[in-house]
Image: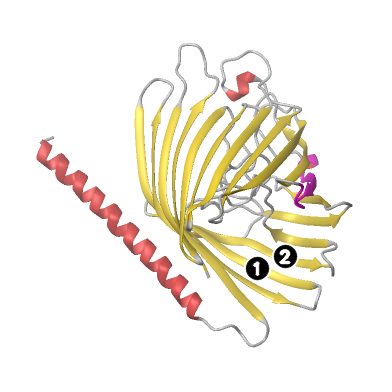
Amino acid sequence: MPSHFSDRRTRSTIVSRAVRASLLLAATGLVSFGAIAAPAESDGWQFSGDFRGGYFASERTARDGTESDEDAFNARLRLAFERSLNEEWRFRTRVAGRFSSEQDDLDVYLRSYAPTRGGADFGDITLDEAYFGYQAPDDGLRFKVGRMQTAFAVPGVASKGLDRNDSPNIGVNWTDGVHLDMPVAGGWRGHVIAQYQDAKGSSSVTAAPLDFSDSGSRTTLFLGLENKQRLGAITQRMLSLTWMPNSLADLGLGDPSRQDYVTIDARIAAEWPLGTAGAKFVTGAEVGYALNTPVDAVSGTGGTGDTGGLAWQLQASVYDFAPNHNIGLAVGRADAGWLISPDYRPNDSSVEVRYQWQFLPKTSMEARVRERRELEHPTGTRSRVDRDLYVRVSHKF
């Protein structure tokens, strides 16, 4: 093929992608503007939402050394409606959609499982919230039932979690079930989350070989004990346990063997002021361990025993190093047997730097550079390496 024809086709492809991305972001922006301009209803309904969108690019060096890359303009739009029923009870619902310049079509649905192990796909529009919530006076008992967001993460510019962190970045996930949040003592609060799991899959991030086809795997249970009352420099302490009965296909998805998947997790965070200009340093750590893990043959690590179950992360952030400018570093890794983090892939180490600029009260710009490297791999191959970056804008309304 003549080189000038190849160059012309490449330019045409780039222009086509740019046009599709511009139309996508423009359409999303018009929807956002219309929503912002819409007045609040007089019957007590309140409207809110958020938009995130920008340029995402990645490149991969595979185990055999081959290289590939991709890029796209991606976005997420969420529109929420909420109404107080009385002083204690309220109802809230939210429509969420993911969009990309590379998507094929649109899919609007309402079901209890996500189409991918990572959640909603690009082009998907669904409800990610539809719940009744109860709040007792004086910061007492809190209760939600229905479809909701559940998230526990280490604070920082690159806020991340190892076990339960619905809808990070531009993702769309949800929890169908019940969340009980109750005071215990001394600033500690207890969390009990019972989540329904569909036989066709989960609505949360779950890596293979987690599987919910067994009738005994319908409910996942999360127990947490959290304290956010300040103790010196410490701002957060939390212990949690996740129990997924009959959900681990330890010998592979094609084998009938199923085990309970049980993890324990602990996180802590602290904060110190820096000088007198309002700057502060925030740091946190989290460590988790899976008690049962799949065999190496299932995970493709090249080993001959069971995969490891350890996961950990460290974060450090400086807020307002210049007015409204923040920067953070996140380092972590997850063994091949840690299967429930939306932020760290199994059998990977990760290093990222993230920068934020809050240039308006409800609008910010964020940029991230990240490298993820495979921990274990079969003899005769090399570690898979993924590098990615994004520049995105976030707006709340």
Please state if 130 lies on the left or on the right of 245 as rendered. Answer: left
Q: Amino acid at mark 1?
A: Thr
Task: Give the quadrant of the N terminus.
Answer: top left
Q: Amino acid at mark 2?
A: Tyr
The correct choice, above or below, for 244 with respect to 84 in the image is above
In terms of depth relative to the viewer, which is nearer, 54 or 275? 275
Q: Which residues are magenta?
A: 216-231
Please state if 182 lies on the left or on the right of 151 as rendered. Answer: right
Q: Is residue 221 inside the magenta stretch? A: yes
- Residue 93 is labelled as 1
The correct choice, above or below, for 117 with respect to 187 in the image is above
| Residue 35: image location, x then y, percent | 50, 75
- Residue 145 is labelled as none
Q: Are marks 2 and 1 in contact (CB under 8 Å)?
A: yes
The first of marks 2 and 1 along the sequence is: 1
Residue at left offset 79%, top offset 78%: 86
Q: Residues within 10 Å of mark 2 (few under 14, many from 20)?
A: many
- Residue 131 is labelled as 2
Please state if 66 lies on the left or on the right of 371 as rendered. Answer: left
In terms of depth relative to the viewer, which is nearer, 54 or 276? 276
In terms of depth relative to the viewer, which is nearer, 209 or 72? 72
| Residue 165: image location, x then y, percent | 64, 48
| Element type at mark 1 | strand
Tally of numbered tags: 2
| Element type at mark 2 | strand
For the question of whether residue 200 can be seen, the reply is: no
| Residue 377: image location, x then y, percent | 52, 19
Residue at left offset 62%, top offset 35%: 313
The correct choice, above or below, for 378 with respect to 232 in the image is above
